[in-house]
Image: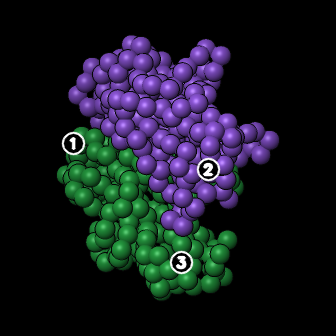
Amino acid sequence: MADTWRYYAPTVSWTANKNLLDIWNGASSSKTISVYRMFVFNLATTVTGVLDFAYIYRFTDSSAPATTGSAITGYAHRSNNTALNANTLGGTGYTANITKTAANMLRRFLFASNEAVAGTLNYSGLETLVPFAMVWDSGYSDASTQPLTCVAGAATGYVVVAGAGHSAGTTDLEIEFTSA
Amino acid sequence: MNTWRCYAASVAFAATKHMICIFNAAASARYIRVYRFFGFPTGTTGITSTLLQLRIARIITSLTPGTTITPVAHNAGNTSLDANTTSGTGSTTTLGNFYRGMYISTEEIAITTFDLDNMWCLVPFAELWNAGYGDSNVEPLTCVPATAEGWSCYSTSALTSSAWDFEIEFTDAAT
């Protein structure tokens, strides 16, 4: 097993075109980062939300994502993991150095940011459930399939992005990745 | 790998409560690897609920089990667990980082309706944490030897008159 880590961003607001959670491995990193899973959990309460796409992009900016947002600290799945390389970074809400192009879009999916309600079953409620919150996975242990990878020596990142229509509600996001 | 299961039936929700947890004290020489957490609703009558957030959390420093849970072996031939590996519900410990937060609803389950509350009755949705769908590249949540640490399913707030069954599936190994 490779050293496994988690970026966990709680209570992130849905706003238009927001970079909700990103991971970036700079060219100075000597580590290969493999992204296995991404989760987006609906956390909305008492809100009239929006149905719009969310996106998963690859980006290759040479500088670390920056400005406005917040850094996310990686949490180890095993407390004696080797520390992450200083050029492996997570963040939420960053606006600079995350260049998204159509050619690098990996997935889009419709997300409803309406409140989930006890005693009701609707799309927003389903988005609170673990299997449905997993918006990216590496292939259910299929060794023939690569996870999303940032190779050592090349600046690469991945980001979950809100669509232009999102303007209400909150979410918890996770990125599960290995460093080797 | 020697595999074990902590099972706690009808755990009442309360604010800031460790619904189920496992802890490996520093004196343990074993690796404890948590592969799965499960939570199943049990209420069938008279529960009016709202949503609450359950957390998967690392716990640190020490554990007073509260109500002790005796792990059950998946294989009766398993070597006994280290005495410093303990489990409980309603335990007293120190919270570390949160690794996941997710809403649950604990309203009563009815036979003639199907809504969000029913979803957690179904095994795939009751699985609140998994180690990676069998992907051997991904580490489970791990307790290493000589480090006081553990893992918990933690309730942030109270839900009146409701209780769930909880499980932790874990392995015990020397390396």
**Mark 1 near mark 2, Cβ–Cβ under 8 Å?**
no
In the image, what residue type sits under mark 1? Answer: Thr
Indicate which disc residue B14 carries. Answer: none
Colour in which the image shows chain B: green
Colour in which the image shows chain A: purple
User: Could you tell me which residue is drawn at 40 percent across and 41 percent down?
Assistant: A71
User: Could you tell me which residue is drawn at 33 percent across and 57 percent down?
Assistant: B154
Q: Chain of mark 3?
A: B
Quickly name the residue at label 3: B145
Quickly name the residue at label 2: A178
User: Could you tell me which residue is drawn at 23 percent across and 46 percent down?
Assistant: B47
Quadrant of the rendered structure where residue B131 is?
bottom right
Instruction: Say above or below: B162 vs A16.
Output: below
Callout 3: SS: loop
In the image, what residue type sits under mark 3? Answer: Pro
Quickly name the residue at label 1: B48
**Residue B170 point in image, percent of width and height:** 55, 67
- Alpha-carbon distance for marks 3 and 1? 44 Å
Q: Both on one chain, marks 3 and 2?
A: no
Q: Both on one chain, marks 3 and 1?
A: yes
Give A32 or B85, whichever is nearer the viewer.
A32
In the image, what residue type sits under mark 2? Answer: Thr
- Alpha-carbon distance for marks 1 and 2? 42 Å
Which comes sooner in the sequence, label 3 or label 1?
1
| Visible residue check, residue B117 | no
Callout 2: SS: strand
**Residue A23 point in image, percent of width and height:** 53, 38
